[in-house]
């Protein structure tokens, strides 16, 4: 799917493939060779390893023998290779880093490097993410989905994919009824003038808790009646509660929009649960008539026992649809509206069974595209002292969290600039750092693993954090600005730290490819951290400003290229790089 974008591997593959064909009398296209190169176990063993297991098998010899034969036959090496050595079942290559640096550093500096097309075929893909519910609180946990989805969209677009970004907020259902119920029957205070969305979310929590507390008491029956009355009006789209829904829904939407503006994410399309609701019931009736959806004790659904997925209920006995019903109509619309070839849902892992059922039903309904649906699941966000729970009151509401973080960043890092920078500059830098901390922290862990959110940890300048990388960028940037333009074009990578840096830089697209195709932005976060550290070692060992020319210019260019790569990498995670910090 990806193009053969690593020019060095490609050149080496094109050189080695015909030698392999001749030496072993087998057919061996260079594309195959390209895919085989891998890392060596250590620098002493070389810079790139070529395994001979597969070739030896085809040629009916043993891999170590094959490596020796290939070493002997491969006499005309590309310029960027200094040496080759058969080591066990591998043929290892040693790089000429001067040659490599002379090619890639100018291409990074000119920006050409970041304009390459990385993907060959780019199926039109929809990525649905950040689907919060209205009338509920937005807390730090919601940021995981948001940051992951946004990073995946940026990575895919950068690589050349045609991406449609969508969201599907839940603006109907019992959570809405609980919130309105509390507002109508129990809330005594005033309606606040600002931040109504966050406030509304606390009413949902209060309502939910009150209903739970009163379960089994004499109040239970009347509570249920009141809730039913609310739900009925919402369904019929008229009445006092429906009007209240419309009004309050806007407050939640305003909160979402604030969060999205803050995080700098945009959706190409917003689907709403309330908009697919009645159409989804119709669709279910249609397939009931066709005989695919069947009645079972008054309810309608599909028996998925054959697939070990139980019974997927699509219409309740009162005729109402369910969550799965809406998802089926939603999928139908996505394919119809956008002719997408791949349909990704970024949703937490609790919904695994739900999506398995939905995708199976879609398939049974005859949607060819059902196979192109994919649930990208992720695990939860916890606090250092355990899971978040609104009941326990240890939820971290988003807006309050951001305010706290910004305050802390100003106090801890930016205070020293009070006399130098304008208040606006301090504020905007603090915002950039807060976003960097959250976005980096949320994407640095693989989707399948839990995240422990720890504000102090995530803001640290001496550990693996977003601010650490932002700081590395800002420092290089200041230094480069201070030293002025290079006066020579010669590029050298002689010291081990310089070679290391070049080796990292040449891997950038390899990492982007992995992060994209494996849905693992963590590959990129880890890379940026390693690159920052490689730069710090370089800076400690290789003086820049005081070095004689042409070394000074060469180091200056290496520094600039590192800064640009850090900046591009951060951008793919949706993180800005502050010019000063
Ligand atoms: N709003 C839902 C929730 O908060 C998530 C929606 C996920 N997307 C979907 N197509 N079902 O649980």
Image: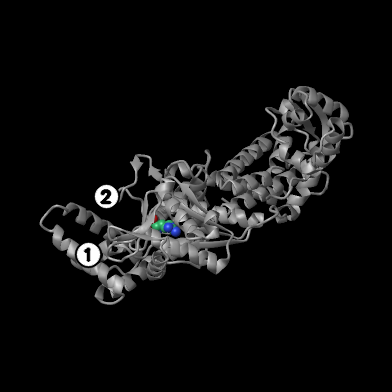
Q: Nearer the viewer, residue 302 or 149?
A: 302
Q: Residue furthest bottom?
A: 238
Q: Where residue 369 appears, x then y in whole percent?
A: 55, 59
Q: Residue furthest front?
A: 291
Q: Where residue 242 appears, x then y in whole percent?
A: 29, 73
Q: Give the SS element for disc 1.
A: helix
Residue at 50 percent across and 62 percent down: it is: 166
> Would you place residue 88 above or below residue 442 in this image?
above
> Would you place residue 76 above or below residue 11 in this image?
above
Q: Where residue 154 appears, x then y in whole percent?
A: 59, 56
> Residue beneath label 1, please?
227
Q: Rounded to the nearest whole Å, what is the CA distance between mark 2 and mark 1?
A: 20 Å
Q: Bin the neighbour count of mark 1 within 10 Å (Cα to Cα): few under 14, some 14-19, many 20 and up.
A: some
Say whether disc 2 or disc 1 marks the residue closer to the N-terminus.
Answer: 1
Residue at 74 percent across and 36 percent down: it is: 499
Q: Bin the neighbour count of mark 2 within 10 Å (Cα to Cα): few under 14, some 14-19, many 20 and up.
A: few
Q: State whether label 2 is within 8 Å of ligand 1.
A: no
Residue at 81 percent across and 42 percent down: it is: 11
**Res. 422 in view:** no
Please give the count of numbered marks on the rendered protein: 2
Q: Nearer the viewer, residue 378 or 424?
A: 378
> Residue beneath label 2, please?
391
Q: Where residue 402 appears, x then y in whole percent?
A: 42, 54
Q: Where ligand 1 lies, by quadrant?
A: bottom left
Residue at 79 percent across and 22 percent down: it is: 65
Q: Give the SS element for disc 2.
A: loop
């Amino acid at each position: 799917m990806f193009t053969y974008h690593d020019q060095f591997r490609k050149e080496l593959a094109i050189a080695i493939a015909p030698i392999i064909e001749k030496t072993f009398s087998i057919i061996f296209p260079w594309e195959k060779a390209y895919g085989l190169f891998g890392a060596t176990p250590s620098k002493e063993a070389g810079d790139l390893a070529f395994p001979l297991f597969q070739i030896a098998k085809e040629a009916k010899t043993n891999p170590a023998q094959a490596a020796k034969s290939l070493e002997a036959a491969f006499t005309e090496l590309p310029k960027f290779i200094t040496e080759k050595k058969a080591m066990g079942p591998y043929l290892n290559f040693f790089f000429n880093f001067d040659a490599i640096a002379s090619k890639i550093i100018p291409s990074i500096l000119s920006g050409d490097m970041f304009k390459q097309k990385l993907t060959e075929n780019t199926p039109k893909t929809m990525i649905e993410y950040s689907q919060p519910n209205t009338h509920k609180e937005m807390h730090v946990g919601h940021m995981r989905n948001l940051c992951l989805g946004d990073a995946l969209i940026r990575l895919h677009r950068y690589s050349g994919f045609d991406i449609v970004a969508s969201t599907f907020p839940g603006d109907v259902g019992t959570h809405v009824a609980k919130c309105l119920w509390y507002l109508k029957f129990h809330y005594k205070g005033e309606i606040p003038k600002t931040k109504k969305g966050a406030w509304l979310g606390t009413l949902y929590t209060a309502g939910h808790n009150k209903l739970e507390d009163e379960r089994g008491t004499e109040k239970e029956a009347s509570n249920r009646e009141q809730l039913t009355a609310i739900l009925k009006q919402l369904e019929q789209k008229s009445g006092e509660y429906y009007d209240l829904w419309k009004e309050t829904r806007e407050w939640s939407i305003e909160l979402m929009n604030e969060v999205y503006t803050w995080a700098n994410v945009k959706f190409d399309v917003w689907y709403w649960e309330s908009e697919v609701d009645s159409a989804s019931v119709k669709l279910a009736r249609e397939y009931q008539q066709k005989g695919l959806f069947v009645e079972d004790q008054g309810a309608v659904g599909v028996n998925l026992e054959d697939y070990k997925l139980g019974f997927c209920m699509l219409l309740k006995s009162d005729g109402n649809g369910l969550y799965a019903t809406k998802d089926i109509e939603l999928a139908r619309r996505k394919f119809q509206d956008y002719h997408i070839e791949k349909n990704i849902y970024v949703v937490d892992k609790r919904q695994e069974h739900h999506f398995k059922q939905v995708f199976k039903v879609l398939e049974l309904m005859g949607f060819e595209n059902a196979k192109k649906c994919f649930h990208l699941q992720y695990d939860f966000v916890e606090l250092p002292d355990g899971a978040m729970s609104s009941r326990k009151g240890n939820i971290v509401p988003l807006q309050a969290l951001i305010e706290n973080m910004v305050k802390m960043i100003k106090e801890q890092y930016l205070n020293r600039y009070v006399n130098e920078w304008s208040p606006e500059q301090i504020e905007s830098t603090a915002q950039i750092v807060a976003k960097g901390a959250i976005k980096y922290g949320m994407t640095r862990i693989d989707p399948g693993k839990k995240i422990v959110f720890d504000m102090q940890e995530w803001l640290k300048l001496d550990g693996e954090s977003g601010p650490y990388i932002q700081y590395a960028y800002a420092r290089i940037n200041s230094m480069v600005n201070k030293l002025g333009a290079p006066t020579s074009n010669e590029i050298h990578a002689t010291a081990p730290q310089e070679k290391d840096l070049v080796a990292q830089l040449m891997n950038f697209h390899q990492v982007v490819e992995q992060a994209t195709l494996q849905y693992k932005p963590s590959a990129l976060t880890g890379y940026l951290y390693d690159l920052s550290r490689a730069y710090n070692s370089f800076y400690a060992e290789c003086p820049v400003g005081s070095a004689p020319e042409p070394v000074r210019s060469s180091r200056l260019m290496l520094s600039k290229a590192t800064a640009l790569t850090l900046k591009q990498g951060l951008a793919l995670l949706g993180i800005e790089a502050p010019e000063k910090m």
